[in-house]
Amino acid sequence: MNPGGSTYAGKLALITGSRRGVGRLLAEHILRNGGRVAGFARGESTIDHPDYHHFQVDIGDPASVQQGFAALKKVSDAVHIVVNNAAVLTSQYAMIMPPAQAQAMINTNLMGAFMVSREASKLMRKGKWGRIINIGSMAVSLEPIGDSVYAACKAGLATLSNVMAKELAPLNITCNTLSITAIKTDMLAQLPGDKIDAVIAGLPIPRYAEPDDIFNIVDFLASERSSYITAQTIYMGGVN
């Protein structure tokens, strides 16, 4: 039996940023393990599976998120698991960071996750069960040069998760954050490879993350047995 098989059977997971990178990897993992997946992304679908439903949503736009949920409700009246994965990154010194790029990171990386969690929790409330998993970053702890706004957004995401965990606990909904290190994706390819290699070399476990490292933690946080785990941030690779 696949490791995540029983976790996702009979469940619908909403994943933002599902077209590529970590979002697509997670969507395909959940589909392989018997779950249904709704994907939110700005572009067209890159996943062809009978249990995958794609919605073109810009999560940085609150109106687009609400429209996406209206469309989702025509497909399913329940959302069991949310993975707030979508993010944008502009790595630049604060002095020369274009304000529009900084605002885009705030809109997508922080406000987008808030809006998706807000709307999804309304559906989870009806079923009195839910798992919200926010994808954070090692940048919160390492505070790399050039990532002032990105790291601040991801720090805010963890705090958002912790506060929502308190608000939603009476409804049997947990909220946690998985702060990943570096995994080879399109987003990572925007950054100088030598600088990322140097960061990875300084970790206690000095290697890039593999998809299964992420699947392992998401499976754990999404499981029935993790009902007593909330308001937690899990770092990978020895970052703390």
Image (tube, grey):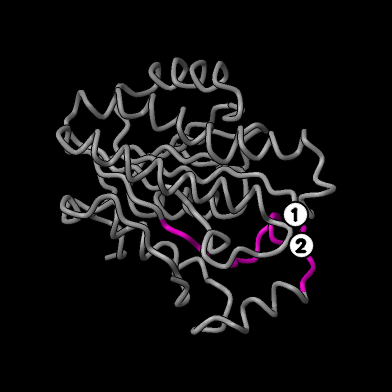
The residue lying furthest to the right in this view is 96
Mark 1 Cα-neighbour bin, 10 Å: few <14, some 14–19, many ≥20: some
Which of the two discs, 2 and 1, labels the residue nearer the N terminus? Answer: 1
Residue 11: quadrant of the picture: top left
Magenta span has 84? no
Q: Residue at x 29, y 50 (%)?
A: 231
Q: Amino acid at mark 1?
A: Ser
Q: Nearer the viewer, residue 87 or 67?
A: 87
Examine the rendered structure and indicate whether residue 150 appears above or below residue 123. below
The residue lying furthest to the front in this view is 95
- For numbered disc 2, what is the local secondary structure? loop
Please state if 39 lies on the left or on the right of 20 as rendered: left
Examine the rendered structure and indicate whether residue 126 appears above or below residue 167. above
Magenta span has 188? yes
Residue 216: quadrant of the picture: bottom left
Q: Which residue is mark 2?
A: 191
Q: Which residue is mark 1?
A: 91
Tell me, for residue 34, which label it has, or none. Answer: none
Q: Amino acid at mark 2?
A: Leu
Please state if 35 lies on the left or on the right of 17 as rendered: left
Q: Nearer the viewer, residue 239 or 74?
A: 239
- For numbered disc 1, what is the local secondary structure? loop
Residue 121: quadrant of the picture: top left
Quarter of the rendering occupied by the N terminus: bottom left
Q: Residue at x 45, y 34 (%)?
A: 38
**Magenta residues?**
178-193
Q: Position of residue 131 (x, y in %)?
A: 29, 43
Q: Position of residue 203 (x, y in %)?
A: 54, 81
Q: Residue at x 66, y 33 (%)?
A: 44
Please state if 184 lies on the left or on the right of 79 as rendered: right
Q: Position of residue 233 (x, y in %)?
A: 37, 58
